[in-house]
Amino acid sequence: MKVLITGAGGFLGRALTRLLIARGDAVIAFDTALGVLAAEFAEDERFVPCPGDITDMANVAQAMLTYRPVAVIHCAAIVGVASSLGSPTLVMRVNVEGSLNVMEAMRLAGTPRLLHISSEEVYGPFLADVIDETHPLDPIMPYGISKAAVERLGRTYRALHGIEVIHLRTSWVFGTELPRNRIPKNLLDAAIAGVPLHLSCGAQTAIDHTYIDDFACGALQALDLPRHPYDVYNLSSGRSATLTEIIGHIRELIPQADLSVGPGAYRFNDQVEAVRKGALDIGRARETFGFNPAFDIRAGLHAYIDAKRARP
C-alpha cells in the first residue's frame, strides 16, 4: 500500500510512518520539516521524502498527482488549545484551508480515502463522564472549531466527489516525542529527571489520555478496513484519569518523584480553563475494526518511563 502522510515529521506522523514502513508499506512523507525521519529512513526505498506545505495548493496537488497514493492520513495541523489561542488566524489557515487543499488535491488525483486526525475538542464541554460519537459538537476554542469545520468539509467532499473521509477523534495523545510541555509528559519528565514540579491547579480534572502506540495501531486498523459503516470514530484509551490519579501512578513507578497539583480546574498555561472532559466511548471503533487499546493510563506512563530511560 502507498500512503501519503501529511505532517509526517510531527509527533503522530512519525509514529504512523514507522509503523507503516515496518509492516512493508510505502510512505510519501509530506511535511515542511522531515529531518528526523529523513535521517532515520535514508536507506529505505519505501520512505519517500516529500517536503511541502499544505497551505500551498500547488505543492499539495503536485505531490498527490506525482505519487498517486491509495490513501492519505492527514496529520498536519497546528495542534492544541493554547497554540490556537495564540494565533487563531494561522490555525484556521493551516487547519481549515490546508485541509481543503488536501481534499481538493485528492479529488484531482482520484485518491479515494482520507483519514483525518480529529480531536475530542470538537465536542466542547462533555455533557457526561463518558461520551460517544453522537455527543453534540459544541467546540468553543479555535482549535476545536477548526477540527469540527474540517469534519463537515469532509462530508461535503464525500457527498460531492465520492472521497471516503474518515475522522478519528483522539484525545491527549502522549509519548516521549510529544513536542509540547503538556500533562502527563511534563510530570513524567520531571519525575525521571528528579526535578520537583508543582501544578497550580487541576487536581480533579479527568481527561482521557492515549498512549502513542495505541493511537498508531488504531489508525492503521481504520486505514485497513475495506469499507466503513461510519465516518467518525473515537480513538483513545476509553478511560479518563484525574491529575491526582496520574501523579499517584507516577509516584508508584518512581517513588522519589516530587510532584503535586493544586485544586480547581486544569488551566492551559495557567491561564485558560479547560472545558469539562472525561472519557471517550471507543465501542464503535472496537466493534467496527477491532480497536483494543493495550495501554490504560498506568501502563502508558510505565511505557513512557521505559522508553525515556532507554533513549534519553
Image (cartoon, grey):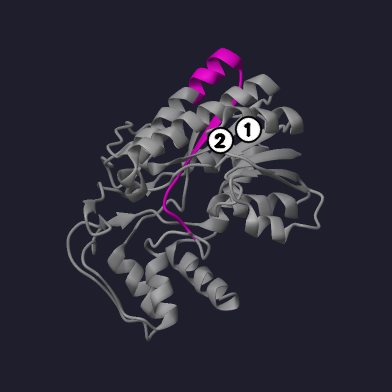
159 inside magenta stretch: yes
In the rendered structure, which amino acid carries the disc numbered 2?
A: Ile
Q: Badge 1: few (under 14), some or many (20 or more) residues near its Cα, within 10 Å?
A: some
Q: Magenta span covers which residues?
A: 154-174
Marks 2 and 1 in Cβ contact (< 8 Å): yes
Q: CA distance from mark 2 to mark 1?
A: 7 Å
Most extreme residue toward the top is 160
Q: Position of residue 243 (x, y in %)?
A: 30, 64
Q: Position of residue 49 (x, y in %)?
A: 71, 47
Quick check: 114 above or below 9?
A: above
Residue 101 tag number:
none
* Residue that mark 2 sits on: 54
Q: Is residue 229 visible?
A: no
Quick check: 239 above or below 106?
A: below
* Residue that mark 1 sits on: 59
In the rendered structure, which amino acid carries the disc numbered 1?
A: Asn
